[in-house]
Image: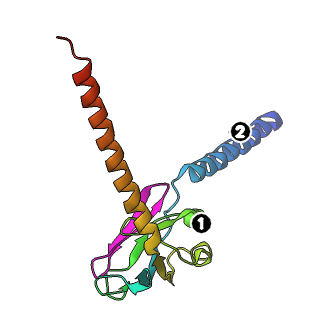
Amino acid sequence: MQCTGTGRVLIIILQVFMLLTVSTMSVAVAEESPQMPSLPLVIKGNVTIDGSQADPGTSITAKINDQIIGSVQTSNAGVYGDLSGNSLIVTAEPEDFKNIAIYVNGNEAEYDGDKLVNANPGDTIELDLTVKKDSMETFQDNSMFQFVLLGLIIIIAVFVALRYRSK
C-alpha cells in the first residue's frame, strides 16, 4: 500500500506530534521525581562551659526552628566526635545550614557560624562550642522567678477564695 502526497504529510505530522508528546512527558516525569536528600553534615570539636571542659554525658543538640535535626552526648570530657559514633550528625539541606542553632545541655552555644555556612553536605567539620555560665544562670534565675510568681498567684487565689466564699 502506497501513501499519496497528502497521506505522507499526515503521517509525518502525526509522527512529529507523537515525538513531541513523548518528549514532553519524559520532562514532566523528570521534574516530578523526588530529589535525593543531601548527605548529612558531620560535626565534631571541643565543648566548654564557662571556660571548663564539659563533663562526659553532656548533651549536644542541633535544631532548625525548634526542630531537632541531630543530637549526641559526649563520651569524654570537653570533646565530641572523638570516638566513632559520637559525632553530631546533622541532616539538613545546605541552604538551611545558616539557620542551625546548637545547644549544650539545653543552652544555646556560641560557635563560628561561618564554618557551618561554608560547609558542604557530607563534610566533616571541626566546630568548637562554648556556653557561658551567665547564660545558664539567667535561664535558672528565670525558672526561679516563674516558680515564685506562680506561688504568689496561688496564695492570692486562695486568699480571695476564702474571703469571698459564700456562707
Between 161 and 45, the residue placed more toward the observer is: 161
The location of residue 20, given as percent across then percent down, is: 70, 45
> Which residue, given by chain and number where applicable, does mark 1 sit on?
98
- Classify 81 as above or below 20: below
Q: Residue at x 49, y 83 (%)?
A: 128
* Front residue of this view, candidates 59 and 99: 59
In the rendered image, which quarter is residue 154 located in? top left
Closer mark to the observer between disc 1 and disc 2: 1
> Is residue 47 on the magenta stretch?
no
Name the residue at 28% across, 82% down.
Answer: 56
Residue 40 visible somewhere in the drawing: no
- Comparing 86 with 160, the one in front is 160
Magenta: predominant secondary structure element?
strand
Where does label 2 land, which residue? 14
**Amino acid type for the residue under numbered disc 2:** Leu
Q: Is residue 42 above or below residue 1?
A: below
